[in-house]
Image (cartoon, rainbow, N blue to C red):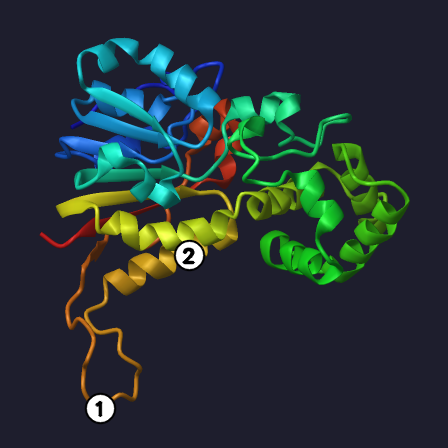
């Protein structure tokens, strides 16, 4: 499975611009059936289909499923592509995938350009944007939105979210400021959270700070790190012998989880260091292909600045 080098943008649509397409396609070479766990606008799926793979895709967002289905309708009619609404961390709920194993599995843990650009989705800190951030959109009541999280969480929970997910040194002060402000008026739009950030971080704070803290709230709203930690071993067990898992992350916590998981799976013995006798599996489950994450090159970043923070790690299961 391979594609000739093409300039960035070949697989873009107005819905989303996929990142690191070439190394993804190269990693999946030889995989006849690929699971795209985060379909988005279908860019990665389209490239994999063009390279000769069959693709089954999953996404939590009904809008993403609709956009990709329209884009790839001919492949769907030919039986080479299928898309299912669902969460990759709850694959067992998608009964059409029961017992199916894959030669390749892809996770792109970012959000789509469409989700960011549509103000009503609430992923942006643009003035007036609703504090929503739910991956599923407002089609489900299962997930409370960002406004509910900010208004209902206690100060300690807010501090933990800001410290762990945003690496914010002033997490305690910011959590306290959120609680103080919501007591006067509940948080409802992006301006409310931006105001709290500026009050604590000072007038020098700007888009980089807003993006980092809004991303932390989004991760908490969608339980993303917990879901990723649960999903990684389950997805690993869906690989065929010699199958490949590729994960694109955009957050240090995500990348750390993936790196540590791949490292453990690639280690023969995972017993405690001083244990006198091995009682674990005693064999490596596979091999880490990327000792360091692959990054977007300058050409891709110039075309799509959102690719700057992408980190790609690849692992191959034992034959």
Q: Can you give x and y, in whole percent of width and height, for residue 296 in the image?
A: 42, 36
Separation (CA) of disc 1 from disc 2:
28 Å
Q: Can you give x and y, in whole percent of width and height, for residue 231 in the image?
A: 35, 50
Give SS at disc 2.
helix
Name the image quarter holding residue 218. top right
Q: Can you give x and y, in whole percent of width and height, for residue 122 in the image?
A: 65, 30
Residue 39 or 2: which is nearer the viewer?
Answer: 39
Which residue occupies 82% across, 41% down? 186
Q: Is residue 68 left or right of residue 125?
A: left
Q: Is residue 247 left or right of residue 82?
A: right
Above/below status of 158 relative to 100: below
Residue 260 or 152: which is nearer the viewer?
Answer: 152
Which residue occupies 58% across, 28% down? 138
Residue at mark 2: 257
Q: Residues within 10 Å of mark 1 (few under 14, many from 20)?
A: few
Query: Could one spot residue 276 in this view of the protein?
Result: yes
Residue 171 or 11: which is nearer the viewer?
Answer: 171
Extreme residue in the right direction: 184
Which mark, by number, is residue 45? none
- Total number of numbered discs in the rendering: 2
Residue 114 or 4: which is nearer the viewer?
Answer: 114
Q: Quick one: quadrant of the N terminus?
A: top left
Q: Can you give x and y, in whole percent of width and height, for residue 74 in the image?
A: 25, 9
Above/below status of 245 relative to 128: below
Give SS at disc 1.
loop
Q: Is residue 292 left or right of residue 256?
A: left
Which mark, by number, is residue 276? 1
Name the image quarter holding residue 282. bottom left
Nearer-N-terminus badge (1/2): 2
Which residue occupies 71% across, 36% down? 207
């Amino acid at each position: 499975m391979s594609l000739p080098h093409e300039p960035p943008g070949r697989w873009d649509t107005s819905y989303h611009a996929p990142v690191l397409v070439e190394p993804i396609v190269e990693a999946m070479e030889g995989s006849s059936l690929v699971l795209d766990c985060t379909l988005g606008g279908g860019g990665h799926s389209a490239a994999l289909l063009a390279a000769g793979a069959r693709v089954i895709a999953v996404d939590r967002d009904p809008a993403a499923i609709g956009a990709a289905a329209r884009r790839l309708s001919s492949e769907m009619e030919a039986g080479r592509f299928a898309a299912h609404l669902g969460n990759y961390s709850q694959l067992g709920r998608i009964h059409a995938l029961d017992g199916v194993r894959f030669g390749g599995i892809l996770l792109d843990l970012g959000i789509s350009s469409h989700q960011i650009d549509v103000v009503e989705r609430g992923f942006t800190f643009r003035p007036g944007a609703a504090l929503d951030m739910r991956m599923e959109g407002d089609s489900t009541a299962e997930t409370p939105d960002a406004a509910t999280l900010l208004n209902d969480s206690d100060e300690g929970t807010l501090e933990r979210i800001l410290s762990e997910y945003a690496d914010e040194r002033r997490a305690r002060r910011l959590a306290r400021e959120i609680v103080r402000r919501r007591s006067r008026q509940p948080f409802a739009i992006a301006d409310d959270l931006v105001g709290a950030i500026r009050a604590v971080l000072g007038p020098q704070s700007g888009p980089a700070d807003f993006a980092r803290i809004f991303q932390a709230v989004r991760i908490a709203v969608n339980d993303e790190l917990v879901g990723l930690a649960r999903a990684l071993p389950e997805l690993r067990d869906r690989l065929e012998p010699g199958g490949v898992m590729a994960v694109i992350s955009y957050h240090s916590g995500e990348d750390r989880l993936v790196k540590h998981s791949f490292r453990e799976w690639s280690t023969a013995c995972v017993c405690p260091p001083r244990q006198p006798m091995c009682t674990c599996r005693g064999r490596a489950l596979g091999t880490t292909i990327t000792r360091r994450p692959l990054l977007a090159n300058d050409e891709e970043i110039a075309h799509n600045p959102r690719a700057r923070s992408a980190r790609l790690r690849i692992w191959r299961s034992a034959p």
